[in-house]
Image: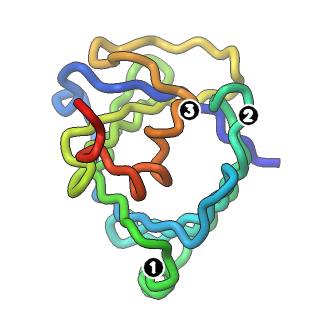
Amino acid sequence: MPLEIERKFLVAGDYKSLATSHSRIIQGYICSGKGRTVRVRLRNEQGFLTIKGPSRNNGLSRYEFEKEITKDEALSLMMLCEPGIVDKTRWLVPVGNHVFEVDEFHGDNDGLVVAEVELKSEIESFECPSFLGDEVTGDRKYYNSSLRVYPYKDWEK
């Protein structure tokens, strides 16, 4: 079973000068509930369909299946999505033996910047770059599926 293991952090410093690439991501959710999601994503000109299971171990890991689909298929499936679209720019930042994915959100989530690092095991160590802030692994309000219904602009600052 494919398992996604990752840790998530708020971003509190410069990451763009360290990034090797970036891409625009638009995603919607065909279904999201009880910790399970079916997501449609457009990443530049590529489409993806992703199914995720409920989080385990305080949000550290979860089942993930992803399949590349055509851009046209993704656009068609977007029509089936629940209300609320997540729009972000993803910056890839290599640090040591890992690549941090830094998501800079737009639209209703403008101002939120989150970094994730994927791991091979739940106890794998990694180098912490200077741009990492507080860890938010397992905090559901930072899940993309949550940001579409309760966006950052509505949070009390």
* In-image side of 89 versus 136 (left or right): left
| Whole-percent x, y for residue 20 in the image | 28, 38
Going from the N terminus, do you reach mark 2 or mark 3 first? 2
Going from the N terminus, do you reach mark 1 or mark 3 first? 1
* In-image side of 78 versus 119 (left or right): left
Assess disc 2: are there few (<14), some (14-19) or many (≥20) residues with their C-alpha within 10 Å of its C-alpha.
few
| Whole-percent x, y for residue 111 in the image | 19, 40
Q: Nearer the viewer, mark 1 or mark 3?
A: 1
| Whole-percent x, y for residue 80 in the image | 51, 83
Q: Amino acid at mark 2?
A: Arg
Q: Amino acid at mark 3?
A: Glu
Assess disc 1: are there few (<14), some (14-19) or many (≥20) residues with their C-alpha within 10 Å of its C-alpha.
many
Q: Amino acid at mark 1?
A: Met
Q: Is residue 87 above or below residue 95?
A: below
- Residue drawn 24% across and 20% down? 12
| Whole-percent x, y for residue 119 in the image | 61, 28
Q: Which residue is mark 1?
A: 78
- Callout 3: SS: strand
Going from the N terminus, do you reach mark 2 or mark 1 first? 2
Q: Is residue 149 above or below residue 141?
A: below
Give residue 100's mark. none
Q: Which residue is mark 2?
A: 56
Q: Which residue is mark 3?
A: 118
